[in-house]
Image (tube, rainbow, N blue to C red):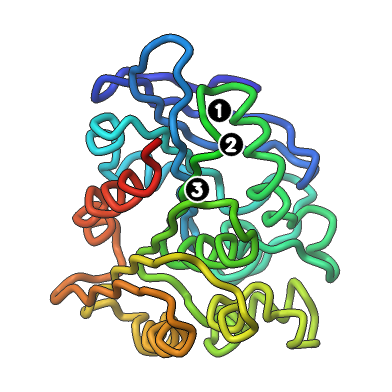
Amino acid sequence: METISETRSHGGVQGVYRHQSAATGTDMSFSAFVPDHPAGTRLPVLWYLSGLTCTQANVTEKGEYRAACAAAGIVFVAPDTSPRGEGVADDEGYDLGQGAGFYIDATESPWAPHFAMWRYVAEELPAIVADSFPVDLDRQGITGHSMGGHGALTLALGLPGRFRSVSAFAPIVAPSQVPWGRKALGAYLGGDEAKWRRHDAVALIEDGARVDALLVDVGEADPFLEQQLRPELLEQACAKADIPLTLRRQPGYDHSYYFVSTFMADHVAWHAERLAP
């Protein structure tokens, strides 16, 4: 693992790192904030998955999570959103290809050779982080924004018992039912929509997947709210499944990191409560 940068911040170290990924067959980068802690201590870890067009840099530079994570003693890890580089398939649209991995393992050409973001986030990166940082993998939480909110929800629902806590900012809750998701799932997984269900939070809940509780924030001024995000579908699915959902519709807020950063401390506190020893 190569250290790209390490910077002192909020009583901890904010780092950016790069490594060769077996899952994607490319170099992958991620950021990690590690608060100061007593020697030998293992800290809970909060994974953050970013949205379309983003890298780990967006939340690292704009997310305003470090003070809250330092106070709670939580390691915060943010991977990139897709494989990148020469020879990696891409698309002219911002919502497919590089920067738009959708946290799934592609099975279709030309995406299959490199787009294995589910395997990367669920298997490879946790092993690397556990080997290199003082994290306690028995205390994991996950969150994310937009496409990353979709990833957080589906990973938590699809890996029962892995995460003690899950939340999301403006998630794509039902990708099978919205344009962003239908484009990506069709391209990466093919036309059999039955194969899409394990990467659709609403479908997973309908099919019996459960989590203990969810915190979701959406902005009422988000231009993608009605067509792409559809939080009411998650609300309906959770009500039918008796999953406690705290869905907060925030007046005046949009889809940007001004929105995410405003409510980041609330989400860190939500996870800290559930990640306590």
Is label 2 in contact with label 3 (beta carbons under 8 Å)? yes
Residue beneath disc 3: 55
Q: Residue at x 48, y 12 (%)?
A: 40
Question: What percent of the width, then of the height, locates residue 26?
Answer: 75, 41
- Along the polypeptide, which appears first: circle 1 or circle 2? 1
Taking depth in this image into account, of 36 and 59 the one nearest to the observer is: 36
Q: Residues within 10 Å of mark 2 (few under 14, many from 20)?
A: many
Q: In the rendered image, which quarter is residue 18 located in? A: top right
Q: Residue at x 66, y 50 (%)?
A: 122
Mark 1 to mark 2 CA distance (whole Å): 5 Å
- Looking at the rendered structure, the secondary structure element under dot 2 is strand
Taking depth in this image into account, of 162 and 94 the one nearest to the observer is: 162
Question: What percent of the width, then of the height, locates residue 230?
Answer: 41, 85
Left or right side of 202 for 33: left
The residue type indicated by label 2 comes to Ser
Q: Residues within 10 Å of mark 3 (few under 14, many from 20)?
A: many
Taking depth in this image into account, of 158 and 182 the one nearest to the observer is: 158
Q: In the rendered image, which quarter is residue 260 located in? A: bottom left
Number of the label disc, if any, that sits on residue 17: 1
- Looking at the rendered structure, the secondary structure element under dot 3 is loop
- Along the polypeptide, which appears first: circle 3 or circle 1? 1
Is label 1 in contact with label 2 (beta carbons under 8 Å)? yes
Is label 3 in contact with label 1 (beta carbons under 8 Å)? no
**Quadrant in which the N terminus is drawn:** top right
Mark 3 to mark 1 CA distance (whole Å): 13 Å
Left or right side of 171 for 150: right
